Image: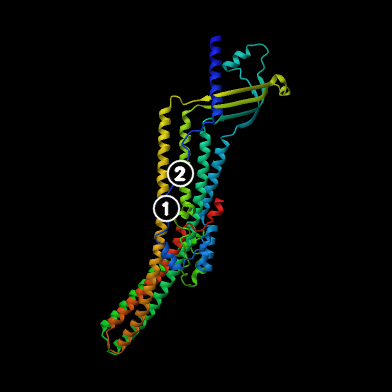
Amino acid sequence: MNLLADERMRISSSILTIAAAALLAGCAVGPAYVAPETAAPPAFMGGPAVDALTGQAKNVDLVNWWRSFDDPLLVSVVERALAQNLDLQQASARVVQARAALRRAHAELLPSGQVSGQASENYQSIESPQGRIASALPGVDREAQSYELNVAAGWELDLFGGKDAARDAARADWQASAAGAVAARLAVAAQTADTYVTIRSLQARLGVARSQQQVQQQLVDLVALQYGKGVAPELQLRQAEGALAQVKAAVPELAQGLDAAMNALDVLLGLQPGSTRTELAAIAPIPNVPAVSDAGGPAALLRRRPDIIAAERTLAASNARIGVAISEYYPKFSLSGLLGTATMDVGRLFSGGATQASGVLGLRWRLFDFGRIDSDIAAARGRNTEALAAYRLTVLRASEDVENAFSGLIKQQARALILGQGVSSLTKARASSLAAYKGGVSSLRDVLDADQRLLATRDAEIQSKAAAVRAAIASFRALGGGWDASATQS
C-alpha cells in the first residue's frame, strides 16, 4: 500500500511539474503567420488610356460611384437594392454567425462554472431484490428524501496554444466573412446598375425597331400603291412585306429581353417580379459614361478589393488551424472543482456536516494516436497550401477584371463613335435611295438594303453605348468601389 501511495505521489508530482513548466514557458505551437507578399505591377496596362479618355480624373468617388452617372433613378434602384437585397441579408447573417463563433472560441479559453441543485423523494419497492433485503432489516423506512446544492468550476489549461490558435482561426474567419459581405455588397450594386443599363438599352433598341417598323410600313404602302396602279411588280411588294415582317419579328424578342431584365431588377430589389414596371415604363436615355480612374493602381487594389481581403483572411485562418492540429501532440491539463452541500434533511442543508468538496487535476494525452494527429496536420497544411493558391489566384483575377473592364470601356467607346458616324452616313444613304427609287432611278432592293443596314447599325450603336456604360460599372466593381476601405482599416 505504501509503494502504491508513493507511486501516485510521484505521478502527481510529475504532472504538476510539467504543467508548471509549460505555464512558465508559455508554449505556442504552429507556424507563425506571415501575410503573403504579392508582386504588383506599377500600373494597369489600360490605365493611361482610361486617364486619357476621361481627362485624368483622379478624384473619382469610388465609395458612391453610382451617383457619378447623373441618373437619379439609377441611384435610387442601387441604394434600394443595397437596403433590401436578400443575398446581402444572407451575407450579413453569415457575419453574425462568424462573430458568434469567435465569441465561442474566446470563451473556450476561460474557466467555466455552473450551479446545480436537486431535491428528490424516493419510495422504495419491497418487491425488488434491493427492497426485499432492506425490508428484512429492522427500522427500514421505505420513504427517503435527498437535497443537494453544488457550485462547480472547470478550466482546461491552454498550455500549448491550441485553443488560442483556434481563437485566431475564428477571428480570421469572422474577418473573412465580413469582407465577403462587403464583396457581396459591391456585386449587388454593380449587378443592379448593370441591369438598369440593360433595361434602358433594350428600351432604346425597341424604340429603334418600332421606328423602323413604321418606316418599313410606309415603304410597303408605297409599293402597294404602285402595284395597284400596275407600276411596280408583285415581287417588289412581297419583298417589302418580307422586310417589314423581319423588323416586326425583332420587336417581341427585344420585348422578352426587356421583361426578363425588369424581373431581374425586381429580384435584386427583393421585390416580387413586376413591382417596378410602372416606375421604369417611362423611356429614359442610357446614362452617360462617367469619369473613371485607376484609383491608385495595382498596389492600392490589393488593399481595397474585399475579395482579396477575404482570401487573405481565409489563408490566415488555415494557418492558425495548423497550430490547432499540432497542439494535439501535447497533453491537455484541466482543473476542476466542486463545492456544495448534500443531505437527506432539508433543515441540515447548510450545516457543516452536509458540506462536500472536490478538486481534480485532469490529464488527457493522445499518446498512442500520433498517426491520426499526423494525418490531421497534413490535412491542415494541405488546406493552407490550397488557401495560399486561392489567394494568389484571387489577386490575379482582380487584376484581370480591371484590365478587361478598362479594355471594354476604351474599345466600346471607340466603337460607339464609329457606329454613330455610320448611322449618320446610312441615314443620308437611305434618304437618297428612297428618292432615287421614287424617281425610278434605282430598284427597291437598294432601298431595302439601305433600311436593313441602317437598322443594324443603329441597333449596334445602342448596344455599344450600353456596353461602354456597363464597362464603366465593371471598372468600378473591379477596382473595389462601393465601400470606404480606409475607414474600415483605420
- Give, as a three-letter code, the residue at label 2: Leu
Q: Mark 2 to mark 1: distance in Å?
A: 19 Å
Q: Nearer the viewer, residue 353 or 413?
A: 413
**Within the image, what quadrant is residue 243 found in?**
bottom left
Mark 1 residue crowding within 10 angstroms, few (<14) / some (14–19) / many (20+): some
Going by the image, does 171 lie left or right of 391? right
Q: Nearer the viewer, residue 322 or 211?
A: 322
Residue 86, horizontal then vertical, whole percent = 51, 55
Residue 405, horizontal then vertical, whole percent = 41, 61
Image vertical order of residue 63 relative to residue 115, above or below: below
Residue 269, horizontal then vertical, whole percent = 51, 60
Which mark is on residue 10? none
- Give, as a three-letter code, the residue at label 1: Ala
Residue 59, horizontal then vertical, whole percent = 52, 63
Q: Is residue 258 visible?
A: no
Mark 2 residue crowding within 10 angstroms, few (<14) / some (14–19) / many (20+): many
Which mark is on residue 315? 2
Q: Is residue 350 visible?
A: yes
Image vertical order of residue 35 relative to residue 452, above or below: above
Q: Quick one: label 2 or label 1, which is nearer the N terminus?
A: 1
Badge 2 marks a residue whose secondary structure is helix
Image vertical order of residue 415 relative to residue 323, above or below: below
- The residue drawn where x is 49% and y is 71% is 281
Tag 1 residue: 40
Q: Do the residues under discs 2 and 1 have CB atoms within 8 angstroms?
A: no
